[in-house]
């Protein structure tokens, strides 16, 4: 079974490597949105610094959300998703692997590019590791919860817009905790509590979200 | 099981549900109207003005029941959705769908009256208080449920998909509430506290109770009426529905 899961992960990643623009557009969107903020609110360093946690996190939510439509849609169109449903391996695990691949191609690049944006927005060097750690814990939650929304809107009219309405309210806890961690450090407090709660949320999502997404896939495809 | 008490599952049969709901709706609606009239009279004429807020507090007689109903109805919707998803009871599926618009209505009402109350009391229509924010997110959850149901053409698939969404929402509501409350205490040092309730005079409490009961009866009437149409529409091919459609009451 592990072999099958490994093969699936390898396949998903190979598809991304062969067509890197899919992953790059998400990062591009993330960078562009954040670059637009100073143009909108003005270049004062203090203001930008204060807005930085929220801006970075909201941009990460939107970037992830835009990439969700592709999570199952391509496989749905060419029929390989039905093969996954018929596979003897538990669908929950297959969904988990697919979500992991999605995170590796969208979430992880956001984490890696975030220090650059943090510097642009005037965050101090000692605050950047907290930002990266919070994003590292938070972006998998976005992919996991997003998978439920992506599965529920599979083959639905106007699914792209609908997914925003379904998923964004559920993104509130990671947003609050993630942006809060950075905020706490910027105010001289400890980010420990935020990061612990974020980890707890990640574990909870890891256990429940693939199951819900698998149930949604069965509903939408049968 | 069969000998004891009322056999509630009898009413899971669409035809029986249709008949029962048809008989209940006028009564529920009638009593709701009477209670509304009585509650409005108590709230506007009998209850004394608040010693701090004057007369503006009277809007809370509709605001508080609306807020309670908005949360209760979401739970009810999720419960019916799960019953429909697991046991495939058609009436439960119709009920889940019928609850959503009323729940959304009460959420809007709670937000709206809250804003109207906030203006004279706090001086602003909206503060990013934890309760206000989570109520707003609850509205988004209702809208997402209704939008998903409306977007899927196949009715059975729409029922199942939105039931799953309601279930995910119910798991998330407490997490959202606590994270928002935490965010709120973090960001607003000196803010308005909605939570501290002054000790309430008996007449105020009675009025609140009457209004809550009125809201609850109104919700039951509207939801049953809506579910009734929904059931009729779903069962339009069956013999009893044909009989009803040919001979309207």
Image (tube, coloured by chain):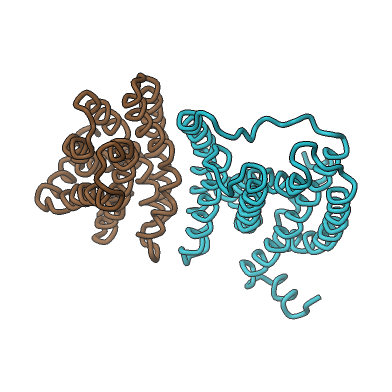
Chain colours: A brown, B cyan
Image location (x, y in percent) of residue A18: 9, 51
Decide: is A221 above or below B177.
Answer: below
The spot of residue B102 in percent (x, y) is: 65, 56
**B131 left or right of B2 in image:** left
Q: Residue B81 appears at what percent x and percent y?
A: 58, 49
A187 sits to left or right of B121: left
Q: In the rendered view, tell whether residue A181 sits above or below residue A173.
A: above
Q: Is residue A197 above or below residue B1?
A: above
Total residue callouts: 0
| Residue located at (36% from left, 62% from top) | A155
- Establish if A157 lies above or below A35: below
Task: Check the picture and name the quadrant holding the C terminus of chain A.
Answer: bottom left
Q: Nearer the viewer, residue A94 or A59?
A: A59
At 36% from the left and 46% from the top, the residue drawn is: A146
Q: Quadrant of residue B31?
A: bottom right
Residue B27 placement (x, y as % from top left): 86, 59
- Quarter occupied by the N terminus of chain A: top left
Residue B209 visible in the shown view: no
Q: Is residue A7 left or right of residue B98?
A: left
Please name whichever residue, A72 or A107, is drawn nearer the observer in this view of the structure: A107
Q: Residue at x 16, y 43 (%)?
A: A13
User: Can you name the residue that lies furthest to the bottom here?
Assistant: B246
Please indicate, yes or no, whether residue B239 appears anywhere in the rendered image: yes
Left or right? Give the position of B18 relative to A214: right
Name the foreground residue: B170 vs A191: A191
């Amino acid at each position: 079974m592990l072999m099958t899961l490994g093969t699936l992960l390898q396949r998903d990643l190979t598809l991304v490597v062969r067509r890197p623009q899919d992953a790059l557009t998400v990062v591009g969107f993330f960078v562009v949105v954040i670059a637009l903020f100073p143009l909108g609110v003005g270049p004062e360093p203090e203001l930008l610094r204060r807005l930085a946690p929220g801006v970075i996190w909201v941009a990460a939510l939107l970037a992830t959300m835009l990439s969700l439509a592709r999570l199952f849609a391509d496989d749905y169109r060419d029929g390989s998703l039905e093969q996954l449903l018929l596979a003897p391996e538990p669908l929950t695990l297959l969904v988990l692997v697919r979500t992991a691949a999605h995170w590796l191609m969208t979430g992880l690049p956001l984490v890696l590019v975030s220090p650059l944006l943090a510097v642009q927005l005037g965050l101090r060097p000692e605050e950047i590791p907290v930002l990266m750690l919070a994003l590292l814990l938070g972006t998998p939650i976005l992919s996991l919860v997003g998978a439920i929304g992506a599965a529920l809107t599979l083959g639905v009219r106007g699914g792209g817009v609908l997914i925003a309405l379904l998923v964004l309210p559920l993104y509130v806890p990671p947003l609050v905790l993630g942006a809060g961690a950075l905020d706490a450090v910027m105010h001289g407090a400890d980010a420990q509590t935020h990061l612990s709660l974020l980890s707890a949320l990640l574990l909870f999502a890891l256990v429940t979200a693939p199951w819900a997404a698998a149930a949604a896939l069965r509903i939408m495809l049968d | 099981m069969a000998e004891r008490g009322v056999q509630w599952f009898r009413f899971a049969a669409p035809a029986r549900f249709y008949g029962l709901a048809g008989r209940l709706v006028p009564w529920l609606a009638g009593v709701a109207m009477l209670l509304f009239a009585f509650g409005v009279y108590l709230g506007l004429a009998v209850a004394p003005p608040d010693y701090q807020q004057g007369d503006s507090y009277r809007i809370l007689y509709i605001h508080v029941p609306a807020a309670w109903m908005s949360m209760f109805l979401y739970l009810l919707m999720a419960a019916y959705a799960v019953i429909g998803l697991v046991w495939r009871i058609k009436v439960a599926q119709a009920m889940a769908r019928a609850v959503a618009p009323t729940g959304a209505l009460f959420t809007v009402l709670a937000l709206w009256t809250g804003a109207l109350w906030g203006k004279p009391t706090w001086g602003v229509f909206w503060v990013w208080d934890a309760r206000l924010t989570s109520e707003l997110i609850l509205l988004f959850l209702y809208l997402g449920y209704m939008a998903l149901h409306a977007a899927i053409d196949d009715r059975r698939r729409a029922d199942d998909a939105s039931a799953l969404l309601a279930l995910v929402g119910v798991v998330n509501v407490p997490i959202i509430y606590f994270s928002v409350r935490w965010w709120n205490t973090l960001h607003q040092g000196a803010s308005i506290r909605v939570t501290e309730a002054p000790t309430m005079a008996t007449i105020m409490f009675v009025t609140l109770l009457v209004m809550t009961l009125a809201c609850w009866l109104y919700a039951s009437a509207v939801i049953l009426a809506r579910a009734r149409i929904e059931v009729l529409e779903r069962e339009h091919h069956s013999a009893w529905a044909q009989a009803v459609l040919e001979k309207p009451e």
